[in-house]
Image: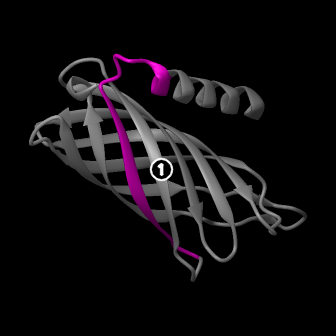
Amino acid sequence: MKRLLVGALVLTALVGLATPNAHAVGIYGIWWMPDDVDDDAYGIGIKDKKQFTSLLSMDMRVSYVFNSDADIIPIEATGLVKLGMLYGGVGVGYYIFTGDNNLNSAIGWYFLAGIEISPGPVSFFGEVKWQALDPEVDGAGSVNLDALVIHAGVNLNRSNY
C-alpha cells in the first residue's frame, strides 16, 4: 500500500510539473521545528498548484529537508481553499528518511494556512504548517516528529510561461 501511495504521489507531482497549463509552479524555503527534537531542520521545495475554481485548488510538493540527525524527502499533496489573499488546507504526505538513522519512511498529514501576494506574473507566499508525523524506529517503536513548519517562497504563475 505504501509503494502504491508513493508511486501515485510521485507520478502526480511529475506529471503536474510537466504540464504547460499548470496554474503556478513555485519554489520555497523550509524551516521545520519538531516538537520533541532539539535540532531544527531546513530545506528547499518545489510545488505545482492546480486551480479548479476561484475557491478550490490542489498542490503537489516535493522537498528536501535536512538537519544533523536525518535527511527527509517529503512528497505531499494538499487540498486548498482560498479566500482573497488567504488560504488554508489539509494534506497528506509520504516522508522518506535517509542518512545514518533507523527511521522508516512514513505517511503523515498536516494542516496549512498561508498568504499569497500577487503583484503580477510572479506571486510571493508564506505558510505555516502543523505537521503530524510518527515514523517507526527499527526495533524501538516510533518517534514523535510532530512539527511547526514555516514556508516562504515564490510562484511563477501561468500567464508568465
**Which residue is most to the front?**
161
Q: Is residue 154 left or right of residue 10?
A: left
Q: Is residue 151 left or right of residue 116?
A: right
Q: Is residue 61 left or right of residue 37?
A: left
Amino acid found under the numbered disc labelled 1: Gly
Residue 9 included in the magenta stretch of the image: no
- Foreground: 57 or 109? 57
Q: How is the image coloured?
A: one colour
Residue at x 87% of width, y 62% of height:
138
Give the total number of marks visible in the rendering: 1
Up the image or down, 119 lies above or below 129; here it is: above
Where is mark 1, residue-wise?
Answer: 45
Up the image or down, 138 lies above or below 114; here it is: below
Q: Is residue 139 left or right of residue 133?
A: right
Residue at x 38% of width, y 28% of height:
58
Residue 97: x and y in percent read 72, 56
- Foreground: 95 or 47? 47
Segment tinted magenta in the rendering: 16-36
Up the image or down, 64 lies above or below 144; here it is: above
Helix, strand or loop at label 1? It is strand
Residue 68: x and y in percent read 66, 77
Residue at x 53% of width, y 21% of height:
15
Residue 94: x and y in percent read 63, 43
Residue 75: x and y in percent read 58, 41
**Which residue is most to the right?**
139
| Quadrant, the C terminus | top left
Residue at x 77% of width, y 58% of height:
136
- Foreground: 13 or 86? 13
Residue 33 included in the magenta stretch of the image: yes
**Which residue is most to the bottom?**
38
| Quadrant, the N terminus | top right
